[in-house]
């Protein structure tokens, strides 16, 4: 199965901690959508989309009919930190989390390992689907977890992987993990 993956468009504020809260989109939204319309294939059998508005708005503006909202594609839950500016967060707690974000959790949130497990279970479910080509509309944390899943890299290294807003990445998911492959999209 061919799987294409895109990240939601830019958000209006970059100074806040946002994972699962809905945040306003940047004024460049329609320009970014137009770029996706020019570069993204349209022959998808299914579109799986995070239910968060920044992804949902993109999916709807791309005019896809067969959208399936999938909680597994939601961004990491930052718990009590959601909506705060990074400077407002207790810096001692933030530093503890930053030292071991794979295992530490923000208060009332989830850690990277939990996000990775959620994404991995979804990919294993996709592996059993009969679709030939699907699209995932999601978030940078989820995309980095997909990379970690495909490349079998330690979670501590995923922030070394850049995930831009206008990038399209694709891979082939096969019946066995060892034969999965990354596709070139341009």
Image (cartoon, rainbow, N blue to C red):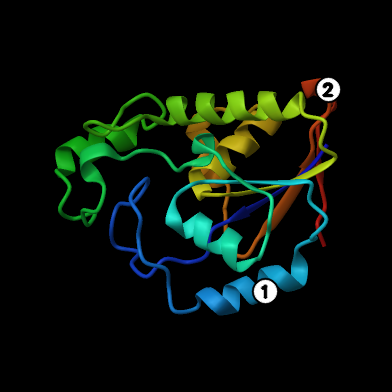
Residue 21 is labelled as: none
Could you say where residue 174 lies in the image, as x and y percent from the top left?
83, 28
Could you say where residue 182 lies in the image, as x and y percent from the top left?
79, 42
Classify residue 41 by image quadrant.
bottom right
Rendered-image quadrant of the C terminus: bottom right
Could you say where residue 17 lies in the image, as x and y percent from the top left?
30, 52
Q: Is 30 placed left or right of 175 in the picture?
A: left
- Distance from the alpha carbon under mark 2 to that under mark 1: 33 Å
**Disc 1 on helix, strand or loop?**
helix
The reply to whether discs 2 and 1 touch (Cβ–Cβ < 8 Å) is no
Q: Earlier in the sequence, mark 2 or mark 1?
A: 1
Report the residue at 35% width, 30% height from top.
Answer: 110
Looking at the picture, does residue 145 appear above or below residue 20?
above
**Disc 2 on helix, strand or loop?**
loop
Report the residue at 29% width, 33% height from top.
Answer: 109
Which one is in front, 36 or 42? 42
Q: Is 32 placed left or right of 12 in the picture?
A: right
Can you identify the residue that label 2 sits on? 175
Q: Is 146 placed left or right of 24 in the picture?
A: right
Classify residue 165 by image quadrant.
bottom right
Can you identify the residue that label 1 sits on? 35
Crowd tier of the residue under label 2, counting other residues whose Cα lies within 10 Å: few below 14, some 14–19, many 20 or above: some
Classify residue 147 by image quadrant.
top right
Report the residue at 58% width, 62% height from top.
Answer: 60
């Amino acid at each position: 199965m061919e799987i294409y993956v895109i990240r939601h468009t830019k958000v209006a504020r970059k100074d806040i901690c946002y994972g699962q809260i809905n945040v306003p989109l940047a004024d460049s939204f329609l320009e970014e959508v137009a770029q996706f319309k020019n570069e993204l294939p349209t022959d998808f059998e299914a579109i799986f989309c995070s239910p968060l508005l920044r992804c949902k708005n993109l999916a709807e503006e791309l005019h896809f009919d067969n959208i399936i909202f999938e909680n597994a594609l939601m961004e990491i839950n930052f718990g009590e930190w959601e909506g705060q500016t990074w400077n407002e967060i207790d810096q001692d707690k933030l530093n503890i989390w930053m030292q071991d974000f794979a295992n530490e959790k923000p208060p009332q949130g989830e850690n990277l390992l939990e996000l990775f497990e959620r994404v991995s279970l979804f990919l294993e479910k996709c592996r059993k689907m009969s679709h030939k080509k699907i699209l995932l509309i999601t978030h940078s944390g989820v995309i980095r977890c997909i990379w970690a899943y495909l490349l079998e890299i330690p979670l501590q290294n995923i922030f070394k992987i850049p995930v831009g807003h206008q990038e399209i990445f694709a891979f082939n998911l096969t019946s066995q993990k060892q034969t999965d492959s990354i596709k070139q999209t341009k």
